[in-house]
Image (spheres, rainbow, N blue to C red):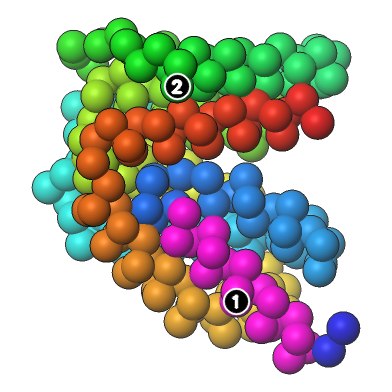
């Protein structure tokens, strides 16, 4: 594959994934990693996805800081940091297939249950953020999948679409810094990575802009259905 073709395909994939992230708040990495893995190694895809995710979070936060639920965010970040070491233990000692099947079933059942009977519980304060953040830290440390518990927390808190989108980005911004730093320490910041990422920036900016417009058009009931549908898809990916 020529370098031009690789750059164009990377830009297109990142545009699609950025649009999804900007529209609903998460899901870009779950799409980008397997799609980029078709045209490059996962070692190359991972830092590109990390740089993209950080860029998305930063731009959305700068454009809409008033929509962030900071009371929840600091609790989620703190408990995630505490949960990461437990995730590393899970990764090293628990049977990976069994854990992924159980997690996949949980997400599928939760998502389908709320799609069929949309009467979800309502968490009226932030104290439960520590629980969801801790679980997110475990899953992030073990399988780099900290998004679903935070998304579930947001639906239970009944965040409006703009609050959901902005608060998720605040959370992902801090977790993304750690990921990017880790990639740099192990030598994944290669000239090819920087070239593909920088050439893809116009597509990333376009995806953020269009996704932000769509986010404002989505009514709350439809937004919740989209989130639950994404959780079902994530669950099936774990099962597969």
The answer to which of 230 and 190 lies nearer the viewer is 230
Q: Dividing the image into 4 quarters, which one contains the N terminus?
A: bottom right
The magenta stretch is 3-20
Q: Residue at x 35, y 67 (%)?
A: 210
Mark on residue 11?
A: 1
Q: Position of residue 51 (x, y in %)?
A: 54, 62
Helix or strand or loop: what does disc 1 sit on? helix
Q: Which residue is mark 2?
A: 115
Residue depicted at x 19% and y 27%? 71
Q: Quadrant of residue 142?
A: top right
For the stretch drawn in magenta, what is the main secondary structure?
A: helix
| In the image, residue 111 above or below residue 51 | above
Q: Determine the secondary structure under disc 2.
A: helix
Q: Is residue 160 left or right of residue 240?
A: left
16 in the magenta segment: yes
Above or below 98: residue 16? below
Mark 1 touching mark 2, by CB under 8 A? no
Q: Does 202 appear in magenta? A: no
């Amino acid at each position: 594959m020529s370098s031009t073709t690789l750059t164009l395909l990377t830009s297109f994939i990142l545009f699609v994934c950025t649009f999804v992230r900007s529209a609903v708040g998460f899901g870009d990495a779950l799409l980008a990693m397997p799609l980029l893995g078709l045209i490059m190694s996962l070692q190359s895809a991972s830092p590109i996805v990390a740089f993209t995710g950080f860029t998305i979070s930063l731009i959305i936060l700068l454009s809409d800081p008033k929509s962030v639920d900071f009371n929840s965010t600091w609790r989620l970040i703190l408990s995630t940091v505490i949960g990461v070491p437990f995730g590393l233990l899970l990764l090293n000692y628990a049977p990976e297939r069994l854990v992924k099947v159980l997690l996949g079933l949980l997400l599928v059942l939760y998502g389908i249950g709320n799609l069929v009977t949309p009467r979800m519980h309502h968490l009226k304060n932030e104290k439960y953020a520590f629980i969801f953040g801790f679980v997110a830290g475990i899953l992030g440390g073990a399988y780099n999948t900290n998004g679903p518990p935070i998304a579930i927390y947001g639906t239970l808190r009944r965040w409006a679409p703009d609050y959901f989108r902005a608060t998720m980005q605040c959370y992902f911004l801090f977790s993304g810094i750690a990921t990017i730093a880790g990639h740099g320490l192990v030598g994944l910041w290669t000239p090819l990575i920087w070239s593909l990422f920088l050439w893809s920036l116009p597509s990333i900016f376009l995806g953020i802009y269009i996704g932000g417009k769509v986010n404002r058009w989505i009514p709350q009931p439809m937004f919740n259905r989209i989130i639950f549908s994404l959780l079902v898809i994530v669950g099936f990916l774990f099962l597969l």
